[in-house]
């Protein structure tokens, strides 16, 4: 009789532990999926915004190049001036911008993935 109670208790304990482990693994799978989706949606939103901003930048650059060309009177000069400006900006970002850009991207994505205020 006592052996049967002990056997049933051990069997119940085994079932409870297995149920706990299954629930715990499901919870962490769901949490990982949620954090992955937050990161993925943040990335997609960033890419859409970057595309729209770069398209606007291209249009503004063409308009500025045309205005400069008309002001100077040489048809291609505005394009060379705008291109030279972007080349200088590129060189400056290449030399000085690695660390600030990495910090900014890491901070933004970390905030998007690990911010659990809505739990």
Image (cartoon, helix red, strand yellow):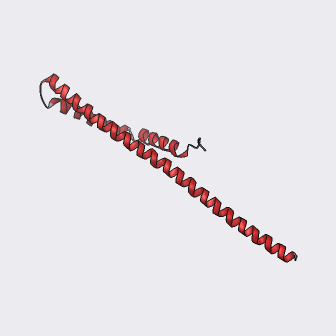
Image position of 102 with respect to 1: above or below: above
- What count of labels does the image hold? 0
Residue 6 visible, this angle? yes
Choose top left, top right, bottom left or bottom right for residue 19. Answer: bottom right
Residue at 75% x, 67% y: name it.
Answer: 13
Q: Quadrant of the C terminus?
A: top right
Image position of 26 with respect to 98: above or below: below
Q: In front here: 4 or 87?
A: 4
Query: In screen coordinates, is 43 left or right of 88?
Result: right
Query: In screen coordinates, is 33 left or right of 76?
Result: right
Q: In front here: 4 or 56?
A: 4
Picture coordinates of residue 73 (x, y %)? 12, 24
Choose top left, top right, bottom left or bottom right for residue 86. Answer: top left
Q: Find the residue positioned furthest to the top.
A: 71
Picture coordinates of residue 4 (x, y %)? 83, 76
Residue at 68% x, 66% y: name it.
Answer: 18
Image position of 54 with respect to 29: above or below: above
Q: Quadrant of the N terminus?
A: bottom right
Picture coordinates of residue 93 (x, y %)? 34, 38
Q: In front here: 10 or 83?
A: 10
Residue at 75% x, 72% y: name it.
Answer: 11
Picture coordinates of residue 39 (x, y %)? 48, 48
Q: Find the residue positioned furthest to the left.
A: 74
Image position of 2 with respect to 48: above or below: below
Residue 94 visible, this angle? no
Residue at 60% x, 59% y: name it.
Answer: 26
Q: In front here: 90 or 55?
A: 55
């Amino acid at each position: 009789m006592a052996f049967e109670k002990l056997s049933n208790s051990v069997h119940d304990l085994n079932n409870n532990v297995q149920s706990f482990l299954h629930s715990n693994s499901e919870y962490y799978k769901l949490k990982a999926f949620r954090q992955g989706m937050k990161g993925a949606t943040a990335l997609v939103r960033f890419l859409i915004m970057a595309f729209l901003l770069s398209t606007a930048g291209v249009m503004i650059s063409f308009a500025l190049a045309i205005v400069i060309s008309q002001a100077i009177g040489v048809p291609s000069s505005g394009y060379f001036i705008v291109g030279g400006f972007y080349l200088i900006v590129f060189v400056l970002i290449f030399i000085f911008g690695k660390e600030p850009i990495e910090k900014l991207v890491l901070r933004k994505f970390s905030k998007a993935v690990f911010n659990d205020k809505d739990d």
